[in-house]
Amino acid sequence: MAFPQHVRLVEVGPRDGLQNEPEPISTTTKLELIERLGAAGISYIEAASFVSPKWVPQMADHRQVMKNLARRDGVTYAALTPNLKGLEGALECGVEEVAVFGAASEAFSQKNINCSVAESLARFEPVLERAQQAGVRVRGYVSCVLGCPYEGEIAPAKVAEVSKALFEMGCYEVSLGDTIGTGTPLKAKRMLEAVSRDIPMDKLAAHFHDTYGQALANLYAVMEEGIAVVDSSVAGLGGCPYAKGASGNVASEDVVYLLDGLGIETGIDLNALADTGTWITQTIGRPNRSKVGVALASR
């Protein structure tokens, strides 16, 4: 297959990038980050996560974030809603789109959302039904598609099984997540081959963490197969609280630089995006893991 002509970036910085910070991050900072990302041309931003403050205290201000967004035309502001309670809260805040997240690993599912894979899928059914009643689209995530911190290797057939269940349930798009960043290009292609037997390629997205420095290589590999939606995090912020040692999602700046070099359209201003990465890392006192961001800042 040829590379896609246009790639949509899904920015998960405000959620995946900030939930692991040890110190509270102000709502004002989150709102400014979201505004800066929109101004840089990001058209899809996961702005909040309606999860339990007990488990993810950094996301306790999800209502304030969603209600105080300076919404831009053409930008989707989505929220994670792991259960019906989370969805109802998001709907009250005028959410446009939501996401549910499962896993291809039984052990990870237990650690992450305290239930089996089958139980998690059953929990999502009323979420999908309620969202459809409200006219809100639902995106699905599958974690640990290329490896699990507890189980090790994950069979592509298991990833395909969970992905198919989410798609048939009503998720308009399924994001395939290498949560611990251990995947390699060949593994990524084999996993995608299995999943795409049941789900059209244009309904799939890639979500690769960069723990072993393979995220860009993996993205290149799956884009060769037709993937045209990429999840990323500004400055490479983030990680996974249930996967020790896992680094952040692939840096948005690095992805845009790669896509620009391939002649693939994104509609994103790389310099503005890199400035945003520099600003947020300096604001929260974290290292900038984007090689492109650091290079541009040193000019």
Image (cartoon, rainbow, N blue to C red):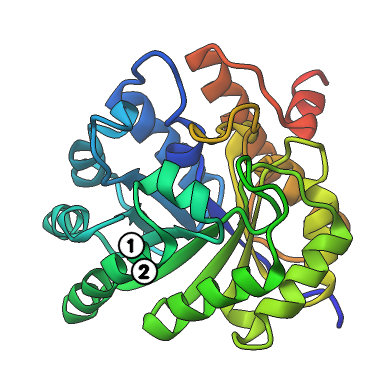
Residue kind at label 1, given as amino acid type: Val
Which residue is pictured at 61% across the width and 70% down the height? 158
Check disc 1 and report its element: helix, strand or loop: strand
Q: Is residue 33 left or right of residue 229?
A: left
Q: Nearer the viewer, residue 9 or 112?
A: 112
Q: Position of residue 76 (x, y in %)?
A: 39, 61
Q: Is residue 256 left or right of residue 98?
A: right
Image quarter in which the C terminus is found = top right
Q: Position of residue 216 (x, y in %)?
A: 80, 49
Circle 1 residue: 98
Q: Nearer the viewer, residue 29 or 227?
A: 227
Q: Vertically, is 141 above or below 288? A: below
Answer yes or no: is residue 5 visible: no
Point out which mark residue 141 bears: none
Which residue is pictured at 65% across the width and 32% down the height? 247
Q: Is residue 120 left or right of residue 153?
A: left
Check disc 2 and report its element: helix, strand or loop: helix
Q: Is residue 173 left or right of residue 133?
A: right
Q: Vertically, is 71 above or below 52? A: below
- Density class for disc 2 (Cα within 10 Å; few <14, some 14-19, many ≥20) is some
Q: Mark 1, mark 2: which one is toward the viewer?
A: 2
Residue 203 placement: quadrant: bottom right
Q: Nearer the viewer, residue 294 or 111?
A: 111
Circle 2 residue: 121
> Label 1, label 2: how many angstroms apart (C-alpha)?
16 Å
Q: Vertically, is 104 above or below 258? A: below
Q: Position of residue 285 (x, y in %)?
A: 54, 11
Which residue is pictured at 24% across the width and 58% down the height? 83
Query: Nearer the N terminus, badge 1 or badge 2?
Result: 1
Residue kind at label 2, given as amino acid type: Leu
